[in-house]
Image (cartoon, rainbow, N blue to C red):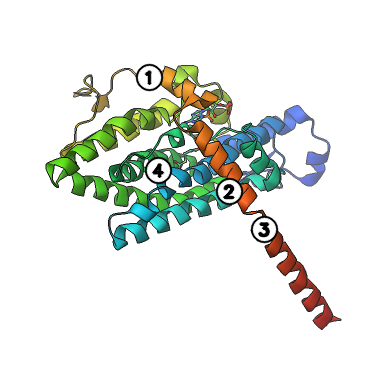
Amino acid sequence: MLKVGNTVKFTPLICAIMTTEEREIEFQAKIDNGQKIEPKEWMPENYRKQLIRMISQHAHSEIVGMLPEGNWITRAPSLRRKAVLLAKVQDEAGHGLYLYSAAETLGIDRQTLIDQLLTGKAKYSSIFNYPTLSWADIGAIGWLVDGAAIVNQTMLARGSYGPYSRAMVRICKEESFHNRQGYEIMYELANGTEAQKQMAQDALNRWWGPSIQMLGPSDAASTNSSETMKWNIKVESNDVVRQRFIDRTVPQAVAAGLTIPDPDLKYNEETEHWEIGEVDWDEFYRVIKGHGPCNKKRLSDRQRAEKEGEWVREAAIAYAEKQNKKMNAIAA
Ligand code: ACO
């Protein structure tokens, strides 16, 4: 292994005769040195598997995440709100597409990933298994859900796998816009009529707990963290990220005149952190095992969309084939 400046390198000749153990040491040195890993480089099989697991769960979350918000596009209270929501939901589709592409660089094809989602084999974020009962829920999703996603994903942008970390940079910029539009909705409702304020508070009451849970189980219960953190796939633990989300969100609730629904919430002057009460982990595990309020509906909606979109895919393939034939005829 050679260190050239700040980069760990090894010559192809040495590489050819290296044992797996030596390659693993070398790989870990690159990770510890802060280097990005690119698709064609050697990587341990479990690094590849962990990435496919995480990136595909993330991609599915973006796609399923369009459903609760899509529910409000036709009912947004003004043309401006409708245009903003439509743009946001389209952004989420784009995020799903970058992420499926990032997963494909690891040697798995998109159809396999989509089949895993449609057959219920794959996980997606717990948070998207809750219903959007009022317009304020759209505000709560942007403010809390996208707020939690930004804190998680700015951390993932520092991760070791090039295609995933680079996708995070753009996604986080778009998520910041989503987050602001959500907070704006909540702020306006919270400072509107009494009924509007109650609607905002009710949405916060329902989305706060699931938003805290969506950042993953506590560090003690996290089964993948030892591997994902050793390889800098995640550069911070679930609890660290959760605390950052809480510290950033509580003052925003106060500024909007809303109350975080946690009687045990308190500010610790010594640590300068907000401390929350017990998290309902039973609810989290119930939802990720398929028993949340909307798990069945989310899956059946995706299955229906796949079926109804079949003719569009067929038409696109037929059109591409026709264009290819035309181009070949011109070239001949
Ligand atoms: N929803 C569903 N499953 C979850 C969630 C969640 N919110 N959090 C954790 N899990 C699952 C994990 O996938 C894992 O299950 P698996 O081993 O069968 O895959 C199990 O619970 C244990 O969790 P961890 O060991 O802590 O898993 P991990 O190290 O992957 O950390 C985390 C979880 C933080 C969510 C990580 O996977 C991550 O950062 N993922 C990428 C971001 C993402 O997917 N965000 C989704 C929301 S995107 C959006 O809001 C638009």
Q: Earlier in the sequence, mark 4 or mark 1?
A: 4
Tell me the kind of residue under disc 4.
Ile
How far apart, in angstroms, are the residues tagged by discs 3 and 1?
43 Å
In the rendered image, residue 130, in percent from the top left (x then y), is placed at: 41, 34
- Residue 280's tag is 1
Residue wearing tag 4: 150
Residue wearing tag 2: 305
Tell me the kind of residue under disc 2.
Ala
Dot in front, 4 or 1: 1
Horizontally, residue 332 falls left or right of residue 58, namely right
How far apart, in angstroms, are the residues tagged by discs 3 and 2?
11 Å
Q: Earlier in the sequence, mark 3 or mark 2?
A: 2
How far apart, in angstroms, are the residues tagged by discs 4 and 2?
28 Å
In the rendered image, residue 217, in percent from the top left (x then y), is placed at: 46, 23
Quarter placement of the C terminus: bottom right
Residue wearing tag 3: 311
Q: Are marks 3 and 4 in contact (CB under 8 Å)?
A: no
